[in-house]
Image (cartoon, rainbow, N blue to C red):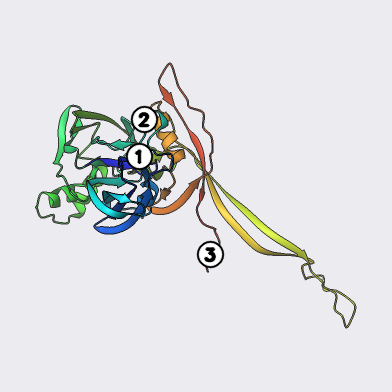
Amino acid sequence: MANVLLRSPYYISEDIGSDLSAKIVITIDTVEAYTIVKNKPANNNNFVLFEIAELVRDYIDIKYNGSITASDLNVNVSYVLYKYTLANAGGQETNLGTTTFFGIDGYGYFEEGSNPSVTQGYMQSNDIIYTLYGEDLRLPVDRNNTTSVTYLYKGSQTFTKAITSSSTEVFEYIDATDSFKERVIEDSGTYEESSCLDSFLLNNDLYLVDEIVLSTTPGTKNVKVITLNECKFEPIKLTFVNRYGALQDLWFFKKSIEKVNTKKETFNRFTINSESGVYDTSIHQNQTFNIKSSKKLTINTGYVDESYNDLMQELMQSEQIWLELNSVVTPINLDTNSLTFKTSVNDRLVDYTVDVSYSFDAINNIR
C-alpha cells in the first residue's frame, strides 16, 4: 500500500456520468469514521471531488517520551465510493470500488504535485547522519519497502537485520548502536551481569558504524554515519516529526545558552492605615501579580555537511518537537522563524544556530 502524506491535501475525483450524486465511506483502523455525500455540480460537470486528508489526519496522535511506538505514527485507511441515480444518495446505488492506504503525518512539496505519497524504504532526507558517541542511533525505515538493514565499519559488517512487512504498521526503528547486552538478548542468549564486563563495555564500543546499507524496494540505499565525541559542551538532542511523518533525531553538539523570560502585571496598592493615617514602609506599593515565566534555549549544531539544509528546513516546518537533555524529554517550540541556507565551497561544512522555547510555563499553573 502507498503511504499518503496527510499534511498535504488528498483529493479524490470521480466521474459519475449521468448519475446525480456520490458518496464516500471512510474507514480508519477498521472503524467507520466518515460518510460524505455530494451532489453533481450545478454546472453539469460529471466529476465529484472529495478532499479527505484533513479528516483522516485527525486520527493520528503522535506521542513521544523518549521511546517510540510505531503504531502511533500511521493509520490504516480504506474508502468506498458509490454513485447514485438521484440527488442526496437516492435512487439506484452503484459501488465504484474500495481503495486502501496508510496515512502518515508527512507532507509533500509544491513541485511534487497533487496527492503526495511515498514508497521509499529510508524515511529521512539526509544521507549523512551525525550522532553522538555512546548514544543510540535510531533509524526509521518503511518496513513494507525495506528487506534488510546492514551496519558497516571500515567496510566490515558489524550487524544486519532482516525487516518483515506489516499489514498494520509503516515504520520500524533500527538501533545502530545496540549494547552488547541487547545484542545477546536479541540472539536469544543469556546475559550474565558482570561489573568487569560492564566497565569494559562502557569504555569500548564494540559496534562502531560509519555506513548503513538499506536493501529497499527500488534498490540499495547507502547512508554515511559520522560519530562525534563532544567533550567541552553538553550535546542536546532534538526529536521531531519529519516530512515523512517519522520521528527523527537531530543532535546539536556545540554551545547552548539558556534564558528565562517573565511576564507580569502590577497595580498600585493602597497602603495607608485608615485609623492612623500612616502607611507601612515594608508593604509593596507597586504590587506584582500573575507572574508567568518561560525558559528559552539557543542551540548550535556545530559543523555539519551542507546537506543539512534540507534537514533544517524540515525541522522548521515540523509541528511537534521534543528536546532531550540528561535523559529528560520535554516538548519545545521552535522560535526561529527564518533561516538562511548555508553553503561552503571549500570544506563543505556549515553550522546552524536556532532558538527554542520550552512548550510550557516554568511555574506549574495547570488547573
Query: What kind of residue is marked 2?
Result: Glu
203 or 59: nearer the eye?
59
- Residue that mark 2 sits on: 112
Dot 2: few (<14), some (14–19), or many (≥20) neighbours within 10 Å? few
Regarding residue 62, the answer to whether it shows in the image is no
The answer to which image quadrant residue 172 occupies is: top left
Q: CB atoms at circles 2 and 3 under 8 Å apart?
A: no
271 or 148: nearer the eye?
148
Q: Is residue 186 left or right of residue 280?
A: left
Element type where label 1 sits in the image: strand
Query: What kind of residue is marked 3?
Result: Asn
Q: In the image, is residue 318 above or below residue 26?
A: above
- Residue that mark 1 sits on: 47
User: Which tag is nearer the camera, tag 2 or tag 3?
Assistant: 2
Regarding residue 276, the answer to whether it shows in the image is yes
- Residue that mark 3 sits on: 364
Dot 1: few (<14), some (14–19), or many (≥20) neighbours within 10 Å? some
Element type where label 3 sits in the image: loop
Question: Which residue appears at 9% of the width and 52% of the height?
Answer: 188
Question: Which of marks 3 and 1 precedes in the sequence?
Answer: 1
Placement of the N terminus among the 4 image quadrants: top left
Q: CA distance from mark 1 to mark 3?
A: 54 Å
Question: Which of marks 3 and 2 precedes in the sequence?
Answer: 2
Residue 193 rendering spot, x and y as whole percentages:
17, 56
Q: CB atoms at circles 2 and 1 under 8 Å apart?
A: no
Query: What kind of residue is marked 1?
Result: Phe
